[in-house]
Image (cartoon, rainbow, N blue to C red):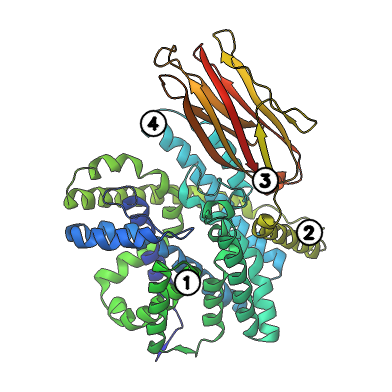
Amino acid sequence: MERTEFTKDDSLIIKGLAILAIMLHNFFRWVEPTTGENEFGFAAHTVYKFTEQITAQPQEFINIIFSYLGHFGVQLFILISGYGLTKSMLNKPQSWGKFMGSRLKKIYPLLIVAILTFAIANLIIFKQMPALGDWREIGRKMLLIHTLIPGSGVSVCGPWWFFGLIVQLYILFPIILGLTQRHGTKILAGTMVISYLWIMTALFLYDHDPGFVLAMQNAPGHLPEFCLGIWLALRRDTCLSRWWLIPALAVFTLGNFFEPFYPFTFLAVSIVFVITYNIVRKPITQFAAVRRPLAFLGSISMFLFAVHGFLRQPFFGIAATPNAATGLIAATLFIATSIAVAMAIRPLYKLIVKLFDKIKTPAWLPKAEKYLMGGTLLLLGFACYHQATTPFFHKNIELTQNEDNKNTLFITEDTITTENLYTTIARIKLGRTNHIKLSVDVEVDTQQTPAGQLPLLVADITGIFWDKCYMPETHGFQQVHYETIIRCPFIYHFNKKTLKLYFWNINGATIRFRNAKIHITY
């Protein structure tokens, strides 16, 4: 039996291990041989691909292991955050408002520095500023709502999804800790149970589309390992027996092969890490050649997390050579560059933190603290409820050509000529929803259309969604199928929407079409 109390050096080492695993994962997941990962949802084929590739290409074991397992470094950050926040709060209690203020004064300077560095990196690497769509996504990240908006969590810079998650955990932390101090660790156990119920509801009611619900990008998806960190900090004399290693490894293994066990893999890997770290802690801390580099990485881990995602692109070309050595060289150069950039932005971050510290707290804020906390919790609760329960309520629309009523307009011409820039297929008024499943089937004849001048099929909801589908070259009528899922942010849930489907004859083509059919579920 080993004690689970972590010192400051332990925390730095754990953060160093975590950020190293995350950086290698985010690099190697784009370098062949790739395996995929079960980070935000479950896919059984990934574990089979992992075993096949590590057997067939053992020389690539570093690439393959981190490609598949490296994302679990996030769990180490969540675990040590729960642990560190609890220790800090026990030593220096704070109200919810003061705690959130202190956290946001660290998060926002980091985001600002990361965004500035991202813009500069784009100028250097791609010779251009980020696109307009990127700035829209950056705005969502500044508002810290990106993980609540389908499709926005990993946009622009994938690792930045973590900012939304950690702030949600900050919102919940003082409440969970306060209730646990009053009523005991049963609060932590109850929180875990509620979290797993939400995860199961979210994952199994969305047709196995994990990107739809974003369960594992938001706080309810990772509360169990966060609560484990709180529990370890509160019960410093409590020991995790090494016998827990066996069931934890069993659950982790099952979770890679069978979806019902998948949500428990994150807590299982956290337990495995705590026990394993306690076993190897002494050799690590005594061996300076290992301890010092890991502690150094841990000390700059938040800067590395902020910048490494958009610095990896230039090194993919080096790693593309089918040679394990070149992949390791590229990864080493990538990590070295990320460290250099992280060290360069640290002074700017500290300067912005000092500026934020000069902002005086308004006199009315402490009095409004309870209302702010209540409103924030209600908003977060509504988002989670909305994401988890929407599948219970849906409607189906089946349209065939030439239907026309107050809610739908489905009038099409049989021929698109060079004079028709836009040709409407359908205009459909939809009720309140956060998602729309759309499929379109139409027979198209483009035999008289020159190559490269084919029109586009466009699906559009103003301000929310726009997508295109290129028509194929045909000889006579050919069936064309288009299918998509339109994810509407929960903040637009109560807005009525109009879905427009049309041919965009951008190239001045002449084609014929017939038998258009549309199926919509929302």
Tell us which disc is closer to us: 1 or 3.
3
Would residue 504 be found to the left or right of residue 120 on screen? Answer: right
**Residue 399 shows in this picture:** yes
Q: CA distance from mark 2 to mark 1?
A: 44 Å
Q: Quadrant of the N terminus?
A: bottom left
Q: Residue at x 36, y 49 (%)?
A: 338
Kindly identify which residue carries mark 3. Answer: 522
Task: Tell me the distance, in whole angstroms, between the alpha carbons under discs 1 and 3.
Answer: 29 Å
Which residue, given by chain and number where applicable, does mark 1 sit on?
261
Task: Check disc 4 and give the amino acid type.
Answer: Phe
- Disc 1 secondary structure class: helix
Gap between marks 4 and 2, in whole Å? 44 Å
Dot 1 surroundings within 10 Å: few (below 14), some, or many (20 or more)?
A: some
* Mark 2, residue position: 365
Tell me: 386 left or right of 288. right
Q: Amino acid at mark 1?
A: Phe
Q: Looking at the image, is mark 4 or mark 3 earlier in the sequence? A: 4
Q: CA distance from mark 2 to mark 3?
A: 41 Å
